[in-house]
Image (spheres, rainbow, N blue to C red):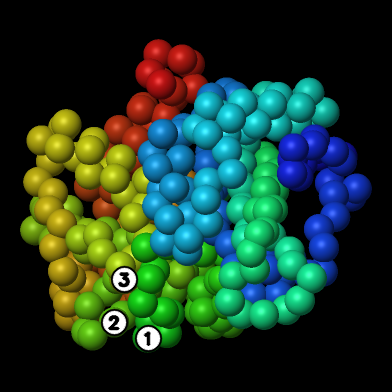
Amino acid sequence: MSTVYLNGKYLPMEDACVSVMDRGFLFGDGVYEVIPAYGGRLFRLPHHLQRLQDSLDGIRIANPLSDTEWEQVLNELLQQNAATDGNKHDQSVYLQVTRGSAAKRDHSFPNPVTPTVYAFSVHIPAPDPDVTEQGIAAITLDDIRWKYCNIKAITLLPNVLLRQEAADQGAVEALLIRDGRVIEGSASNVFVVRDGTILTPPKGTQMLPGITRDLVLELAAQHNQPCREADIEEAELRDADEIWVTSSTKEIVPVTTLDGKPVGAGTPGPVWKTMIEQYRHYRDAVRSGELN
Ligand SMILES: Cc1ncc(COP(=O)(O)O)c(C=O)c1O
């Protein structure tokens, strides 16, 4: 039985309850983070806590915990679950802050209100060898989301519908097109490789500033790999040599078919192979404590 954190307490998941008047439940009024931990060490924690702060600022919720308190809570949760699952190694922590619950259902903010803070951790499975060898299928879909996609809001209904549409078509991810350009995936950032250069769309309010995305850019710069942030037209996506999607728990995943057609040679590309090695090298250095 896994332990969760809810409003200051650590308790078995099945004993954790929130009010039916919680604004997360009624309005999707909250934000979240997903943070991997390797060998019990939280990965890129300051970056995730900064993005959490930005998301909270974006929806006007005061951060209920200091960074030190977050770190203590998340580490305690990881330790408790490592003890019960015998799984000290790779877990990811999901944390969510909602505006809290109020006596009356009203769209405008209740005052005063205490945020609801919830977190749980789950095991990160080892990368699927089929994905590493064959890559995944993706489809393109119209980006039907709102104008503040930089906020990591729990209100994920468009992303849910888009991902399900991909699943219905036998694909793993949907790449979202807005104004003729690819923005990101339904739960991932997107990269393409064209003529040896790695490209990814620039940050803005249309996409989530992915922590994995930033690390890929950092590693590419460190290893002198040609890499640029640039708008990617749909036509450039369609004739890219390689396409990848990135996220904290899936790392860097090669997309080998797009809308049923092969991407490049139709197999994970050479630039991806170099990048995933660099990424795993960095991750393993965090896991062993050599880097933090
Ligand atoms: C819409 C969206 N974009 C990008 C990402 C990747 O972000 P990160 O690398 O921080 O996990 C996610 C992660 O879930 C996401 O939901």
Number of marks: 3
Instruction: Please name whichever residue, 193 or 249, is drawn nearer the observer in this view of the structure.
Output: 249
Residue 247 in the image: x percent, y percent?
A: 44, 52
Nearer mark to the viewer, of 2 and 3 = 3
Q: Residues within 10 Å of mark 2 (few under 14, many from 20)?
A: some
Q: CB of residue at label 1: within 8 Å of ligand 1?
A: no
Task: Name which residue type carries label 2.
Answer: Arg
Residue 238 in the image: x percent, y percent?
A: 23, 76
Task: Name which residue type carries label 3.
Answer: Gln
Q: CA distance from mark 3 to mark 1?
A: 13 Å
Q: CB of residue at label 3: within 8 Å of ligand 1?
A: no
Say what secondary structure mark 1 lies in: strand
* Residue at image location 40% in from the left, 52% down from the top: 54
On screen, residue 107 versus residue 33, left or right, reads: right
Residue 206 has which mark?
A: 3
Residue annotated with mark 2? 178
Q: Are marks 2 and 3 in contact (CB under 8 Å)?
A: yes
Residue 42 in the image: x percent, y percent?
A: 52, 30
Q: CA distance from mark 2 to mark 3?
A: 9 Å
